Amino acid sequence: MDDHRRRFLQLALQAQALRFGDFTLKSGRRSPYFFNAGRFDSGAALATLAGCYADAIDAAGVDFDLLFGPAYKGIPLATALACEYARRGRDLPVAFNRKEAKAHGEGGQLIGAPLQGRRVLVIDDVITAGTAVREALATIAAAGGNVAAVAIALDRQEAVAEGAAHSAAQALRAESGVAVIAVATLADLLAFAGESAELVAQREPLRAYRTRYGCAA
């Protein structure tokens, strides 16, 4: 497993962004684990998380020149990542959207750097149904930007619906041609659980969940 994947999973456990138990997801599925990026709620946690994102993105070799954070969780993630890249010597412009267009002041739906002519990297936490990301892609295209890729924290690698052949990330790529870069995946989580004496008991529930709902990477 790549170092950034292991560091991310360790951080997620420490921040309680990754928890194990019996959870009912929005989809109605019962899952043995739950991921909530909102628990990365300190400067130190966000800085470490941004380093994991940057390492995953750099390893993917994607060409981009602007970071875009979809409202709401994507906003602090893209901002933290911009700070991390600045620390590494690369000063990137950042933009994000409002959920609703503003009718007063400067108006509009977009905040931050102009998207026109930019190669945009979209930063979010997960892709579940993919609705928010698809809206972001449409917003970027309408503003004259070109989406280079989407970077997420965790890819659950599970079918979007019963009987579906693709995960949310795979479906997005098939529909739009946009690649999805994940800092870590369910497969990484399984490997990580196998390395830890504290988490080894979680492997069988995770395997059973993947067998029932999983898609090939």
Image (cartoon, grey):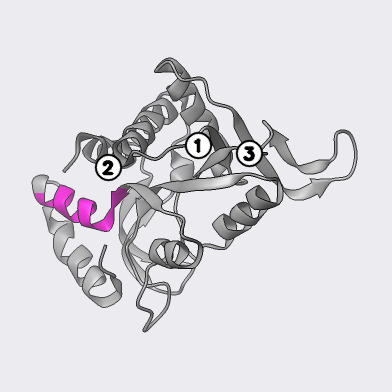
State how far apart marks 3 and 1 are (Cα). 23 Å
Q: Nearer the viewer, residue 161 or 174?
A: 174
State how far apart marks 2 and 1 are (Cα). 16 Å
Question: Residue 203 got which mark?
Answer: none
Is residue 192 in the magenta section? yes
Q: Percent position (x, y) of residue 14? A: 30, 36
The residue shown at (52%, 35%) is 78
Q: Percent position (x, y) of residue 215? A: 29, 70
Side (left or right) of 127 relative to 98: left
The residue shown at (42%, 72%) is 160
Disc number lying in front (3 or 1): 3
- Give the residue at mark 3: 117
Q: Which residues are magenta?
A: 184-194
Q: Residue furthest bottom?
A: 163
- Give the residue at mark 2: 9
Can you see residue 104? yes
Provide the major secondary structure of the magenta segment: helix
Q: Earlier in the sequence, mark 2 or mark 3?
A: 2
Disc number lying in front (2 or 3): 3
In which quadrant of the rendered image does the N terminus lie?
A: top left
**Vertical position of residue 181 compared to residue 129: above or below:** above
Is residue 68 in the magenta section? no
Q: Earlier in the sequence, mark 2 or mark 1?
A: 2
In the rendered structure, which amino acid carries the disc numbered 1?
A: Leu
Q: Are marks 2 and 3 in contact (CB under 8 Å)?
A: no
- Give the residue at mark 1: 77
In which quadrant of the rendered image does the C terminus lie?
A: bottom left
State how far apart marks 2 and 3 are (Cα). 35 Å
Helix, strand or loop for disc 1: helix
Q: Badge 1: how crowded within 10 Å, few (<14), some, or many (20+)? A: many
